[in-house]
Image (tube, helix red, strand yellow):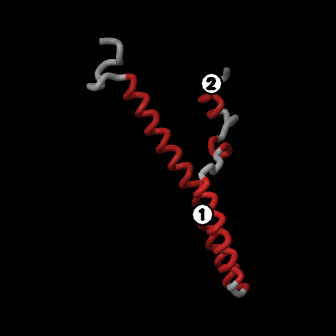
Amino acid sequence: MKSILLELFQGEIAPLDRYQVILKEYREQWDNAMKSENSFVKKLDEPLREEFEQLMDDHFDLIPLEMSDVFAEGFRIGARMMVESLWDNNGDEAKGQA
């Protein structure tokens, strides 16, 4: 079996590509938000509609940056948990070595 770290480094796996929303509540809120947005956009004249769509595009461009930052912080927390699980409470020797 190939190392998952090696696969990640070589770009063979991409966590963001595997991400899927599984929460029913999220899906329902997303659908409601899209219906509300579509209803709102229909009320706008063409210049305002274009401006609003550009504003939304700019906002959505931020989401991948936010997700990558959240992923990195979660990874750091997970790594700290692994290190802590391998060392004693004082942090001066590996568990099982005393």
Q: Residue at x 71, y 82 (%)?
A: 42
Q: Please name the residue that numbered disc 2 is placed on.
A: 3
Question: What amino acid is labelled 2 in the image?
Answer: Ser
How far from the left and from the top, in percent, is residue 14? Answer: 65, 40
Q: In the rendered image of this protein, does residue 26 appear above or below residue 77?
A: below
Residue at x 65%, y 30% (from the top left corner)? 7
Q: Is residue 76 left or right of residue 90?
A: right
Between the residue at mark 1 and the residue at mark 2, the CA separation in whole angstroms equals: 38 Å
Mark sitting on residue 29: 1
**Quarter-of-image position of residue 30:** bottom right
Q: Quadrant of the C terminus?
A: top left
Q: Residue at x 46, y 36 (%)?
A: 78
Q: Which amino acid does the dot numbered 1 rest on?
A: Gln
- Secondary structure, mark 1, is helix
- Whether residue 64 is situated above or below residue 77 in the rendered picture: below
Numbered mark located on residue 67 in the image: none
Q: Where does the image place residue 71, in percent across and percent down from the top left? A: 53, 45
Q: Is residue 97 left or right of residue 11?
A: left
In the picture shown, does residue 90 fall above or below 29?
above
> Label 1: how many residues lie within 10 Å, few (<14), some (14-19) or many (20+)?
few
